[in-house]
């Protein structure tokens, strides 16, 4: 191989064009899969906080009744018996 030779194809044949297209699609799929794998592993390591609507944070009176009864402990004065 001479110093001035180019590694690119001299002519654009259908075979070369198909090969480059397959390589390009494979590269895109590989990069997309790597990004998805990194994103999934980060979601496992550092999960998001649970979703709480802003209406409940700023306006708790609109929260409504819970689906299950909530344990409401009695006041401490009632628990202290002497």
Image: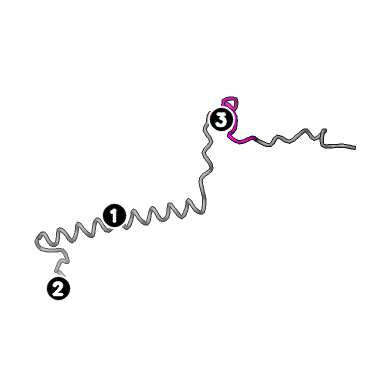
Q: Which residue is mark 2?
A: 2
Separation of residues labelled 2 and 1 (CA atoms): 33 Å
Residue 43 picture location, percent across and down: 48, 51
Say which mark, if any, is on residue 56. 3
| In front: label 1 or label 3 | 3
Q: Which numbered disc, 2 or 1, marks the residue that appears first in the sequence?
A: 2
From the viewer's perspective, tell me whether residue 40 is left or right of residue 68: left
Badge 2 local density, few (<14 within 10 Å), some, or many (20+)?
few
In the image, the segment drawn in magenta is 55-69
Task: Please tell me which residue is depicted at 56% across the width and 30% down the height of the picture.
Answer: 56
Label 1 SS: helix
Residue 60 picture location, percent across and down: 59, 27
CB contact under 8 Å: marks 2 and 1 = no
The relative height of residue 38 versus residue 52 in the rendered view (above or below) is below
Q: Which residue is mark 1?
A: 28
Structure colour scheme: one colour
Task: Please tell me which residue is depicted at 12% across the width and 62% down the height of the picture.
Answer: 15
CB contact under 8 Å: marks 1 and 3 = no
From the viewer's perspective, tell me whether residue 29 is left or right of residue 40: left
Task: Please tell me which residue is depicted at 15% across the width and 66% down the height of the picture.
Answer: 6
Splitting the image into 4 quarters, where does residue 16 fall? bottom left
């Amino acid at each position: 191989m001479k110093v001035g030779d180019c590694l690119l194809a001299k002519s654009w044949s259908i075979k070369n064009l198909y090969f480059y297209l397959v390589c390009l699609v494979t590269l895109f799929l590989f990069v997309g899969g790597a990004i998805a794998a990194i994103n999934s592993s980060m979601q496992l390591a550092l999960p998001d906080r649970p979703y709480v609507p802003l209406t409940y944070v700023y306006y708790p009176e609109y929260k409504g009744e819970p689906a299950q009864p909530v344990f409401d402990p009695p006041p401490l004065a009632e628990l202290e018996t002497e």
